[in-house]
């Protein structure tokens, strides 16, 4: 691992040092020899030397001169001085901070190996420091993109006080003046199908590939940084900046750059994307404005129009975007009927009417489709819970859960959007059908029997919901329909009736009865008894004893 150069004009001393050194133990694999300073410099020039043992009195080039040259030309080499006793005062003048140690002639084993060990310890410490520095740099380089992403997100979310600072801007390379900034939002329309066919179901891999293409295409004009939108997995946010640019120039270059990206992503990966472009801003702290504009431009994209995939915000202001919101709530009665009966013709008819109504406007946008989808999922969740489907078993707003369940949510036209809506409705129909099948083996009386036998336990409705795989709300509804009271009310009534029986035994204390009924607090039991019978347990016992 290490190499040592022995520099002394006396060959017997060099041989003695070679014999006395614990080279293997110290990790020294290579020994070099030099009879004078000139030979030593030649070896240092052509070989790697870690430690040099330097005799102070040598011909041609003495130790003082050699040490100075080593310090100047080979500062990584550690030096150990070899000096005669009579020369020690002279030697002290030559010793600098770079000299690790000194040993006196005649050299003995202990002094030699102690000095060598000191040198090896210094080398190892330097190596550890270097490795730590390299590791820190690697960690920093790996974490910088994530740090930059958090910074941009905090600016976009108007929560910049969480991460933004001038020092941080310098660290991530954004502490520049005279720059203009803009944001584009890219929506992938065929993501579900594509990740399965070409990206091994790895969304991160798709996003990484797309981000690299974005950088490659735009890097001729801009400094760019792309990252996935954490609130919408189909979207990639790209921040671009340009130094000393004019507003019109940057807007023009960015629009044409994004058109090139649309074409390139299609050619390389068959990615079908649309892009919303926000206007340039002068300050990085105004990125939220550009981001909002890019989203508005993206959401204004019309499904019937497949001619232009890049929408600029300044174009949106000229579009006649409908203000009225098409709502799924007007179809709730039909949805209930479809989910209840499973009538496929009714489903097709409902979707056909909906799509015809919206298609006639020819202004149906991506934004409108998202609102309708969100409303549909919300309505379907509510209806499913009413039918007894546990809320924990529903996908809710987790879009990844739909993909796991085999729902493809890709669409770029009306026909595909209709198919997506149909998939959602059919999925929730399956949830409700599964509950109905469970209902055939489940009887509400089972809950009543359990309460009658185990009234003293800490009974919760959730334990029945988990046991029978039915929603808490549905179970409570069924119980009340059959017995005229809620589950909690029935538990209370059973305990109170049992309390009356136990109070007739005068040997039982109120505290004992309270514990036998499952109450941990005597006072709580007494309060519950009084609320139920309008008298305390003691009053009831006294009344019965008369």
Image (cartoon, helix red, strand yellow):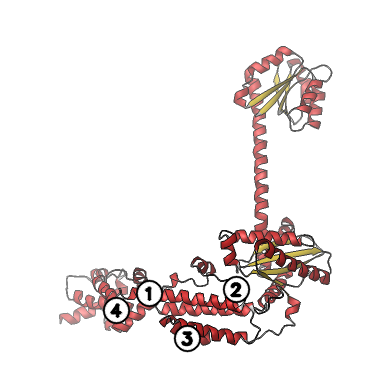
Where does the C terminus fall, quadrant-wise?
bottom left
Identify the residue at image location x=44%, y=85%. Answer: 337
Q: Residue furthest top?
A: 12
Q: Position of residue 507 (x, y in %)?
A: 17, 70
Residue denoted by label 4: 490
Q: Position of residue 522 (x, y in %)?
A: 29, 71
Q: 292 left or right of 530?
A: right
Q: Distance of mark 2 from mark 3, alpha carbons?
A: 24 Å
Q: Earlier in the sequence, mark 3 or mark 1?
A: 3
Relative to 337, 233 lies left or right: right
Give residue 465's mark.
Answer: none
- Give the camera-side residue of 269 and 64: 269
Which is closer to the viewer, label 3 or label 4?
3
Specify the label residue 435 is tagged with: 1
> Few, some or many C-alpha atoms within 10 Å of disc 2 (few <14, some 14-19, many ≥20)?
many
Q: CA distance from mark 3 to mark 1?
A: 20 Å
Find residue 228 and report its horizontal and vertical position in percent: 63, 64
Image position of 109 with respect to 544: above or below: above
How many angstroms separate mark 3 from mark 4 (CA)? 36 Å
Q: CA distance from mark 1 to mark 2?
A: 31 Å
| Mark nearer the viewer, 3 or 1 | 3
Closer to the chain start, of discs 2 and 4, is 2
CA gap, disc 4 and disc 1: 25 Å
Determine which quarter of the picture holds residue 432: bottom left
Earlier sequence position, callout 3 versus callout 4: 3
SS under mark 2:
loop
For the residue carrying disc 4, how many other residues have a C-alpha within 10 Å: few (<14), some (14-19), or many (20+)? Answer: some
Query: In the rendered image, is residue 119 in sight?
Result: yes
- Can you identify the residue that label 2 sits on? 411
- The residue under label 3 is 334
Residue found at the very far left of the displayed protein:
546
């Amino acid at each position: 691992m290490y190499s040592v150069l022995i520099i002394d004009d006396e060959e017997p001393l060099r041989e003695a040092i070679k014999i006395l050194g614990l080279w293997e133990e110290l990790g020294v694999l290579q020994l070099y020899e030099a009879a004078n300073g000139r030979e030593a410099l030649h070896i240092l020039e052509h070989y790697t030397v870690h430690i040099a043992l330097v005799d102070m009195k040598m011909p041609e080039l003495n130790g003082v001169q050699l040490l100075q040259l080593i310090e100047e030309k080979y500062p990584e080499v550690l030096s150990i001085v070899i000096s005669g006793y009579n020369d020690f005062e002279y030697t002290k003048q030559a010793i600098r901070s770079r000299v690790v140690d000194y040993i006196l002639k005649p050299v003995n084993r202990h002094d030699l190996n102690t000095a060598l060990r000191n040198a090896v310890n210094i080398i190892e410490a330097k190596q550890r420091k270097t490795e730590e520095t390299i590791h820190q740099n690697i960690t920093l380089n790996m974490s910088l993109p994530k740090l930059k992403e958090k910074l941009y997100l905090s600016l976009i979310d108007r929560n910049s006080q969480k991460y933004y600072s001038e020092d941080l801007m310098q660290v991530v390379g954004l502490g520049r003046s005279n720059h203009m900034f803009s944001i584009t939002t890219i929506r992938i329309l065929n993501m579900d199908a594509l990740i399965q066919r070409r990206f091994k179901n790895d969304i991160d891999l798709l996003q990484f590939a797309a981000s690299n293409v974005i950088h490659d295409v735009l890097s001729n004009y801009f400094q760019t940084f792309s990252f996935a939108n954490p609130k919408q997995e189909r979207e990639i946010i790209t921040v671009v900046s340009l130094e000393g640019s004019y507003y019109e120039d940057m807007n023009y270059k960015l629009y044409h750059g994004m058109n090139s990206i649309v074409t390139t992503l299609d050619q390389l990966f068959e990615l079908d994307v649309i892009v919303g472009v926000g206007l340039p801003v002068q300050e990085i702290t105004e990125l939220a404005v550009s981001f909002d504009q890019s989203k508005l431009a993206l959401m204004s994209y019309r499904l019937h129009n497949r001619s232009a995939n890049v929408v600029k915000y300044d174009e949106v202001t000229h579009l006649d975007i409908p203000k009225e919101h098409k709502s799924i709530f007007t179809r709730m009665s039909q949805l209930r009927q479809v989910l209840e009966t499973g009538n496929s013709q009714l489903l097709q008819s409902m979707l056909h009417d909906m799509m015809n109504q919206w298609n006639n406007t020819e202004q149906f946008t991506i934004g409108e489709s998202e609102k309708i989808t969100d409303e549909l999922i919300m309505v379907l969740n509510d209806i499913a819970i009413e039918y007894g489907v546990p809320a924990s078993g529903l996908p809710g707003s987790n879009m990844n859960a739909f993909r796991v369940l085999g729902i493809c949510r890709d669409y770029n036209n009306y026909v595909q959007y209709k198919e997506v809506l149909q998939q959602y409705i059919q999925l929730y129909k399956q949830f409700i059908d599964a509950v109905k099948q469970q209902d055939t083996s489940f009887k509400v009386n089972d809950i009543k029997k359990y309460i009658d036998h185990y009234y003293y336990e800490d009974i919760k409705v959730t334990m029945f919901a988990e046991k029978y795989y039915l929603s808490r709300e549905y179970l409570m509804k069924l119980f009340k329909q059959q017995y005229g009271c809620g589950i909690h009310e029935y538990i209370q009534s059973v305990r109170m009736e049992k309390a009356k029986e136990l109070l007739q035994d005068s040997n039982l204390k109120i505290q004992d009865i309270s514990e036998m009924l499952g109450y941990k607090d005597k006072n709580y039991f007494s309060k519950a008894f009084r609320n139920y019978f309008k008298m305390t347990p003691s009053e009831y016992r006294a009344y019965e004893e008369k």
